[in-house]
Image (cartoon, rainbow, N blue to C red):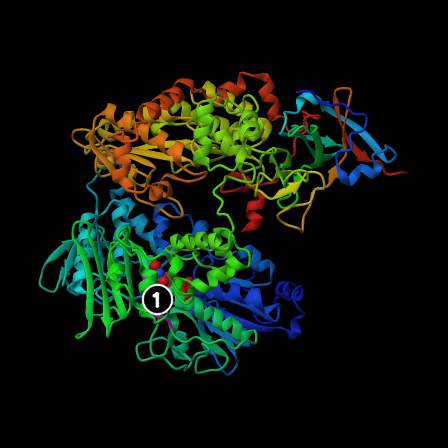
Amino acid sequence: MSPVANTSDISVGSNGLMETRSATVKSRSSQRRVVVVGNGMVGQRFVDDMVERADGAWEIVVIGEEPIGAYDRVALSTWFDGASDDDLSLCDEAELRALGVDFRFGRRVDAIDRDAAEVTLDDGSSLTFDHLVLATGSYPFVPPVPGHDTAGCFVYRTLEDLRQIRDWSTTDGGEGGGESPSPTGVVVGGGLLGLEAANALQNLGLRTHVVEMADRLMPQQLDPAASAMLRRWVDELDITTHLGFATKEIEASVAPDGTKRVAGLRGADGDLIDADIVVFSAGIRPRHQIAEACGLEIGERGGVVVDDRCTTSDERISAIGEVACHGGRTYGLVGPGYTMARVLADRLCGGTSTFEGADLSTKLKLLGVDVASFGDSTLHDGDDHVVFADPTSKVHRRVALRDGTVVGGVLVGDASNYEALHAMATGSMVSANVAALVLPDGLSDVEVAELPDSAQLCSCNNVLRGDVKTAIGHGCHDLASLKSETTAGTGCGGCMPGLSALLTSELEARGVAVDRSLCSHFAHSRQELFDIVRFHRHRSWTEVVRAHGTGRGCEICRPTVASILSSLSAGYVLGGDQAGLQDTNDRSLANMQRNGTYSVIPRVPGGEITPAQLIELGQIANDFDLYVKITGGQRIDLLGAQLHELPAIWQRVLDAGMESGHAYGKALRTVKSCVGDTWCRYGVQDSVSMAIEIERRYRGLRAPHKLKSAVSGCTRECAEAQSKDFGVIATEVGWNLYLCGNGGRVPRHAELFATDLNDEELIRYLDRFLMFYIRTADRLERTAPWFDKLEGGMDYLRSVVIDDVLGICDDLEADMAAHVESYECEWAATLADPDRLDQFIEFVNAPDANSTPVWVTERGQRVPASAGAAR
Amino acid sequence: MTAVEHEAWPSNGADTDVADGAGIAWIDVCAVDRVIPDCGIAVLVGDEPVAVFRLSAFDGGPEEWCAVGHVDPIAGIPVMARGLVGTIGEAPLVVPTVASPLHKQRYNLRTGECLDDPTVDLPTFPVRLHTGRVEVGAPVTPT
Ligand SMILES: Cc1cc2nc3c(=O)[nH]c(=O)nc-3n(C[C@H](O)[C@H](O)[C@H](O)COP(=O)(O)OP(=O)(O)OC[C@H]3O[C@@H](n4cnc5c(N)ncnc54)[C@H](O)[C@@H]3O)c2cc1C
Ligand code: SF4
């Protein structure tokens, strides 16, 4: 994102651009100006609420210190799993600017002049306000031990922090194909954020330690027994924990040129932990400095004091989010901040709502483990406790009762029934049946349908069960509309299962048939349709829709049937009547980009490519002026090809001995690999050859969603196989197989399915697993959510794939054999048939005319001009 | 596939009132067989990009032809002919649609109306089949 224009010219009234912009909303004179300091999660929510409600009565100016607009800090760690800045963004900058919001990113407010009602920015300019909102959040506390600022010490709060952490740990050998043993990372602080940071370091391939001063992990939230159970999960992830460790000093090593870098942590008792990188996560402190400097009241333990209206000791100034101190406390969670944002926006628009404090109950997934605490979670003498503790499944659930009423508790390893228990602890539901509720998932479950309306369903946005019911009553009959109407489920997503269960039960109660059908043209689910097509051996869309559907289909059922036909190897995807079924990308055998051009991604099996092929790809890009980017899956993406250029480009790709990469289809994408024992000193198997074998076997395989895979040559896992739909990691004697992981917005670790398989077993189980998934998954369902719905989880999957309890393995293998047999490169088939090439003429009646996209040059390459405009 | 041939195929409801030929110049764009059923093609009518769709017959009804603007009105990019066709509604009120390949908004192929965003629509054009050829009508401005 480029820096905001006109930042140097922002004193009041002199900015012509601003004048015209706000004039389109309301005439300037009648508008009052609210200046928002800080564009974090809460500041952004406030802006969104204002834009929705203020109806042009307020001119909104936002000053944000970070170089980009607000992003999802709660999901910060997913950035390491490939979520881009865009994926995390919460700020629809272009749209909000069009509505008149004036964003100034990369600018900090340095001082507030209350008499002049003016703020001063770090570039010396100033800006008056009618109302000022402080949403400056917190900063991470770094204990002032000697050496705390040595190169290699970081904090974990912003995208920039993560970028620095990644750069530091990868330049040090983390990615270098195992040239040096993995570096060591130490996180100072064993609280919630510390553990999250530790998990991130671990995923970066570092040997990871956590040091915690207290005698247990998460001392704020967990009692000793619950914490000990969490410790088991942490140990299992190979993260080393040092409890009762007080850091005395950060030791540095000094290079010959005098530069210092982190070498280790010295504890109070003299112990030394070696470290190549240190991340401080020892708590957060409100960023109230500018408020303090101008004389606003500050809380005893920090934070700008506000009343129930979120107003500070100055009527014209409010504070919201982590920087606000309400009722003597600050909130380090996003939910209460969002409530404050809503209250303040309502107030400024004439409303009277108030913020009456929030409870600190949370339910989250930490290191992939459910951790929840609710109500009063500390241990008190005299309370009764109902406890379920099972070290084998690493579950600890404790609920505290006072005079027979639930007052709070902690759940580790399994957070089921959280909603009901939370409702009891907050008094919105009568405590009953507690013993049953304390039993973990599967043994007992109170349905969300049975909760009272005042029970909180979504803790991130404080949405009550009653709110959701009202929205369903108003016609939100699917999850998407329910989410956008109520904002439930738009935070951490932990409440989605409850939300969906409630939706189903409410619709059933209302007599609305709960429709599992694909769309209005087929009364079958994808799985049923798959079985039908397979049973009847249908070979074309026409047969399928005539026999089982109605009408001409739609953009949902047509590609679904196309994918099923293709999974069952009904041949060329554009053959027969299938062309009209395919999504645009499948139809053109290329991915359409924002300006209507396409990307070309040849298959590079296992990421292995010859110099000659590499040169030819470069030559092709040069000749067609294509933008070149290396993909995350070890391939090369050539972007900006026009429809009519695709055949010529692909001809040259095929001539160079490469083939279609199916990057356009819901199909197998890449099988990533590390160099393995051919080159790497640590390798124990030939990961490249295995990756190539797998990629060749399953190339072109159409599935309900894209499929990704990787093969690592040893447990150092440089190919990141555990983040894939199916990942393979070499062992001394064979291969470990991990299933059902993914990166992206909601990353998931793949789970261990089987160990020490030989080559043949590996392929056999993969054949069965993939076909079983393709047969039974829903439309657009990736392996992880599909797996979540399998009752019995991994044990069940093993029983199907290894023990063949369903007796279908022969069929599954036969289906896969048919796929392997019938595979042909779709581009080779297309280029061989002049009729099919007609598809790539842009204007049928004017073969020589082509539309001309508008291009600009960025860093020496051609990109769509519209991309620049959108920034 | 048998294409029904008509002298004047009253395809787009919006244009039937001028389909008597008075204000329309018919432009031959291609052979009927060049258009794959349920796929669109793009043609140039003058210098205006137009998307022509051939919608296969179902439920005993006739095959239907529609033509709309090829430029996605939201993105301003000429791609509509590459969108996926479908139908919405139940018999007898079945309406043929095309979804933009960029952001999937659906348009009524007969009227050009956008079903997902009432603020935009596509222009529509009359289409007819004439001796095995597809012709698109362009309004003639009287001089
Ligand atoms: C890794 C991580 C995981 C988390 N997980 C959870 C979770 O699971 N659940 C949960 O509820 N919460 C979680 N949180 C906490 C949550 O992110 C915060 O509560 C939330 O971001 C607070 O929003 P805010 O707007 O008050 O502050 P912030 O999001 O910190 O935003 C403040 C912004 O103001 C800017 N700023 C500060 N001073 C100035 C100035 N003088 N001028 C201009 N700009 C300024 C800052 O640069 C920053 O961008 C997590 C936090 C982190 C770091
Ligand atoms: S064999 Fe592969 S996974 Fe193991 S260290 Fe070498 S490059 Fe990394």
Q: Is residue A260 above or below residue B61?
A: below
Q: Nearer the viewer, residue B138 or A34?
A: B138
Q: Residues within 10 Å of mark 1 (few under 14, many from 20)?
A: many
Q: What's the residue type where badge 1 is placed? A: Ala
Identify the secondary structure beneath mark 1. Answer: helix
- Is A580 a magenta residue? no
Report ligand 1 position as a quadrant: bottom left
Mark 1 lies within 8 Å of ligand 1 (Cβ measured): no
Q: Residue at x 21, y 43 (%)?
A: A182
Q: Is residue B122 above or below residue A186?
A: above
Q: Which residue is mark 1?
A: A423
**Which secondary structure type mostly characterizes the magenta part of the structure?**
loop
x and y percentages locating residue A209 in the rendered image: 19, 53
**Number of numbered tags placed on the structure image:** 1
Q: Quadrant of residue B138?
A: top right
| Observer able to see residue B130 | yes
x and y percentages locating residue A564 in the rendered image: 46, 29
x and y percentages locating residue A176 in the rendered image: 27, 38
Q: Quadrant of residue A763?
A: top left
Please indicate whether residue A659 sits to the left or right of residue A864 in the image.
left
Please indicate whether residue A847 sits to the left or right of residue A748 in the image.
right
| Observer able to see residue A3 | no
Q: Nearer the viewer, residue A4 or A590?
A: A590
Q: Which residues are magenta?
A: A358-362
Q: Residue at x 14, y 55 (%)?
A: A273
x and y percentages locating residue A581 in the rendered image: 56, 30
Q: Chain of mark 1?
A: A
- Is A361 a magenta residue? yes
